[in-house]
Amino acid sequence: MTTIRLALDVGTTAIKAAAFDPQGKIVAEDSAPSTVIRGPNGENEQDPEIVWDAVATCLQRTAGQVDPARIKSLGICAQGDGFWPLDAGHKPVRPAILWSDTREDIAKDLAELSGGPATSAVGRGCNTALWPGTSAMGWRWLRRNEPKAAERVQYVATCGDFIGHRLTGVLSTDFANATIPFLDIASRSYGNAISALECTDLQDKLLPPKRAHAVLGHVTRAAARATGLPDGLPVSVATLDLGAMIVGLGMSRAGETMMILGTTAVVNILTDQIESTDDPIAATVLHPTNEVAIRVLAPSTGAAAFDWFASLHPLSLGGEGTDEIAMKLNALVEQVPIGANGVTFLPYLNGERAPFVDPTVRAGFLGMSGSTTKGELGRAVMEGTALSLRHCFEEENGLPTLPVNLTGGGARNPVWCQIIADIIGQDVMVNSASDLGLWGAACIGAAAVSGEDPIALAARNTDDLVTYRADPNRHDTYAPVFKKYRKLSEALRGASASEESPT
């Protein structure tokens, strides 16, 4: 009888469950929406009980499609960070403050901390730039604004931790989820950031971290009734969705890189060398199952740049839908040489957060003339977004030395993928599978039961892998294009700062 590896991915806006055979084929799946409660001042919250109900329904519908006797494990990944406070009975104290929360008074509190000993301690400990949607900032807000609720808090969890507890009755966290903002990566324990952020009253409420491929516990009788899962099913410690995706790709060695070209972009670099700094850019999290760390640099604009530009020209480009419009734009772009005949696009449609932080900087075309064409502008958009990815690499530790994995909606565009490969000077391997996080979680869950290496379990044959070979000559041609891009970026940021300065 073929065993089944079950996986759960509790995202911010969607919850997914899938049942895999050992070769990585999905044999059952289901999904459910997850509601974010948005406020007028940047509040982003979720009711943990509603999230749990959606999880239970999703698992029940997935488990109902297979023989429950075949299900041997469950792995969990979920949205990370945020502030999910629980009381002594492990019940939610209030709605969870999400990783994406930017409410004004938290942002103001963070601005007052920035550049001081608190953010320096976070940088020195976990090489991460502090942002509003972290447990530290949520706790500071709760103490000021809801002191009665703060008195009831006994545990601080993440989304995955909370769901894992509902399934097993055991509350724990993994190293990836525990990293930001309190962990000291060097010692793998909570460090000086706790006192520097004035959160010593939170110290005994933080969960001791474990490896994700440890057994968290077993599905309780109550959870089995709610989810349709077998009573006593082993469940692994929940991990960060990004970490599960990296496991799903089989990545565990320093130097390996994965990029996501979704609405926003993400550059993920595995490293065993973390340099402590008072003022880091972007974030660092520990790998869910191995000793390396993951540097996470997330430019604010990814495939959204292409979607934005294509939406400006639907009639002139022709086409019935977005895919056909994209094909017609690609045809124009392919006729334009490297460098878009001198046109540069700075892709800061929503400000920028990596490799520099500037929420006020905005996008722009530079180098246009009266003869500039749609094809030149379209190529400049593709190049500008790819150059921002290279910028992340250059600001970190230089261009990648190993082939790079690429996934996300933008990875479906072959012209763009080739541009990225040529700009970063490294082969780009596109994996169009949409189940990487679920597959990684499934392998982590299976490893918790078998004791095997999750990375080895994640190996699977796939027809979805396409490799775009970097051309050395085109890479050399892009060198002055990138140099100009950086100069123009610095000039634009300088102009943006000047506009904000009082006269």
Image (cartoon, rainbow, N blue to C red):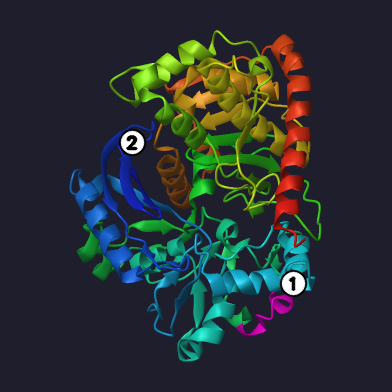
Residue positioned 70% across, 49% down in the render: 496
**Residue 258 image offset from top left, x and y in percent:** 59, 35
Q: Pick whichever, 284 or 286, lies toward us.
A: 284
Q: Residues within 10 Å of mark 1 (few under 14, many from 20)?
A: many
Q: Secondary structure at mark 1?
A: helix
What is the quadrant of residue 489 in the picture? top right
Q: Position of residue 305 (x, y in %)?
A: 51, 34
Amino acid at circle 2:
Asp
Figure check: 16 above or below 123: above
Foreground: disc 2 or disc 1: 1
Disc ID at residue 21: 2
The residue shown at (47%, 29%) is: 309
Q: Which residues are magenta?
A: 192-201
Residue at label 1?
Answer: 118
Query: Magenta stretch: residue 397 in it?
Result: no
Q: Earlier in the sequence, mark 2 or mark 1?
A: 2
Question: Relative to 488, is 322 on the left or the right?
Answer: left
Residue type at numbered disc 1: Ala
Give the answer, above or below, for where 22 lies relative to 226: above
